[in-house]
């Protein structure tokens, strides 16, 4: 994700995410033309008229500075630093430019972030430590009494249960905080799936393998001899319309393809690793 939104990204974010408007609807409500509004939101656009900036800022209820990327604040351009209750060190870190403050802002605004801070405060202040220690002590005392009285085997089920029931403080807090953060990160990740900077979920290699599997399935289902199926596969791979070849061309092409040992091996894998249910018609 971008650390800072450009003017086109801010305009599109305000229109789509906050106002839920189409370009046509925005044009009707602002008096600006649909084509101009579309150009303003293009990634490569660098020009926008002062009149449009003022009009859109007023419509969205944000400052012109925000639309121009001069500030990250939509609604609080003049908030005093004292109101944020940040230490000098925290301000220095935020001003350094080394953090993705946009991502930090999304984390803070996530509904689960408050719970994460509460759980972290419990961990830092050791609020629950005494209860965990008391419980562990009681379980361990019970386990020792069982050992003294019954002398069970080392892998005795009740004895092992009393041992595993004891909670390691670091593991407990690590699990709780990890769970809190997981929920936040997953939601933010999902929200940015369509960003231009987000990598595709399917790699080129996976896409190529999938296409080859579908082509092979198509070739195996082609009605013809093995030589014809082989020629059909090569044609489909090269985007050649096999059906449009003359009979003579098909015969010659099939003879040429037959000379490839790789194609012989591929065609011998009839049906292997190809899911018939996954076939799709290629254009």
Image (cartoon, helix red, strand yellow):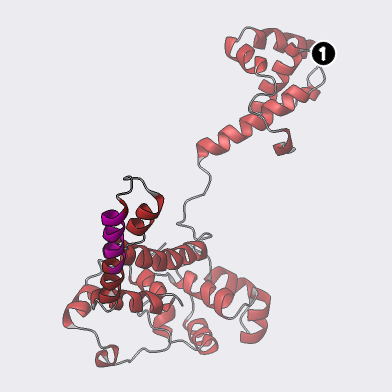
The quadrant holding residue 154 is: top left
Q: Is residue 88 left or right of residue 97?
A: left
If the image is split into quadrants, where does the C terminus sit? top right
Q: Residue at x 73, y 21 (%)?
A: 232
Residue 283 in sight in this render: no
Residue closer to the observer: 137 or 80: 137
In terms of image quadrants, where is residue 114?
bottom left
- Furthest residue in direction left, as rendered: 88
* Residue at image location 71% in from the left, 17% down from the top: 231
As rendered, which of 10 and 133 lies closer to the eye? 133
The residues colored magenta run 138-149
Q: Looking at this view, is 198 or 44 the one in front?
A: 198
Q: Position of residue 7 (x, y in %)?
A: 45, 72
Residue 97 x/y as whole percent: 25, 69
Under circle 1, the secondary element is helix
Image quadrant occupied by the N terminus: bottom left
Instruction: Indicate whether 71 appears above or below 96.
Output: below
Q: Residues within 10 Å of mark 1 (few under 14, many from 20)?
A: few
Residue 140: say if magenta: yes
Main secondary-structure element of the magenta-colored stretch:
helix
Tell whether position 11 is magenta: no
Camera-nearest residue between 156 and 180? 156
Name the residue beneath numbered marker 1.
247
Residue shown at the point (67%, 79%) measured from the top left:
25
20 up-or-down from 184: above or below: below
Q: Where is residue 253 shown, x and y percent of the image? A: 71, 12
Q: Can the viewer see residue 12 in this picture?
A: yes
In percent of width and height, residue 233 lies at 69, 22
> Is 25 rendered above or below residue 240?
below
């Amino acid at each position: 994700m971008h650390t800072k939104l450009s003017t086109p990204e801010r305009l599109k974010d305000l229109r789509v995410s906050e106002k839920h408007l189409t370009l046509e609807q925005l044009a009707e409500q602002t008096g600006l033309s649909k084509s101009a509004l579309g150009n303003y939101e293009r990634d490569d656009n660098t020009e926008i008229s002062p009149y449009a900036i003022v009009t859109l800022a007023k419509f969205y209820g944000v400052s012109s500075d925000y639309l121009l990327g001069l500030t990250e604040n939509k609604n609080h351009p003049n908030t005093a630093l004292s109101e944020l209750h940040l230490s000098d060190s925290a301000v220095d870190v935020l001003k350094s430019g080394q953090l993705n403050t946009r991502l930090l802002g999304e984390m803070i605004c996530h509904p689960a972030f408050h719970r994460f801070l509460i759980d972290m405060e419990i961990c830092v202040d050791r609020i629950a430590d005494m209860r965990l220690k008391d419980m562990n002590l009681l379980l361990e005392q019970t386990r020792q009494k069982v050992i003294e009285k019954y002398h069970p085997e080392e892998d005795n089920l009740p004895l092992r249960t009393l041992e595993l029931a004891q909670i390691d403080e670091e593991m407990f807090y690590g699990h709780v905080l990890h769970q809190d953060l997981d929920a936040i990160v997953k939601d933010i990740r999902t929200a940015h799936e369509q960003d231009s900077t987000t990598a595709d979920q399917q790699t080129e290699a996976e896409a190529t393998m999938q296409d080859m599997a579908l082509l092979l399935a198509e070739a195996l289902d082609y009605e013809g001899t093995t030589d014809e199926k082989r020629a059909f596969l090569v044609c489909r791979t090269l985007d050649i319309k096999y059906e449009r070849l003359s009979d003579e061309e098909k015969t010659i092409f099939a003879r040429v393809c037959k000379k490839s040992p790789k194609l012989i091996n591929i065609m011998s894998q009839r049906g292997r690793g190809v899911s018939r249910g996954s076939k799709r018609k290629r254009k």
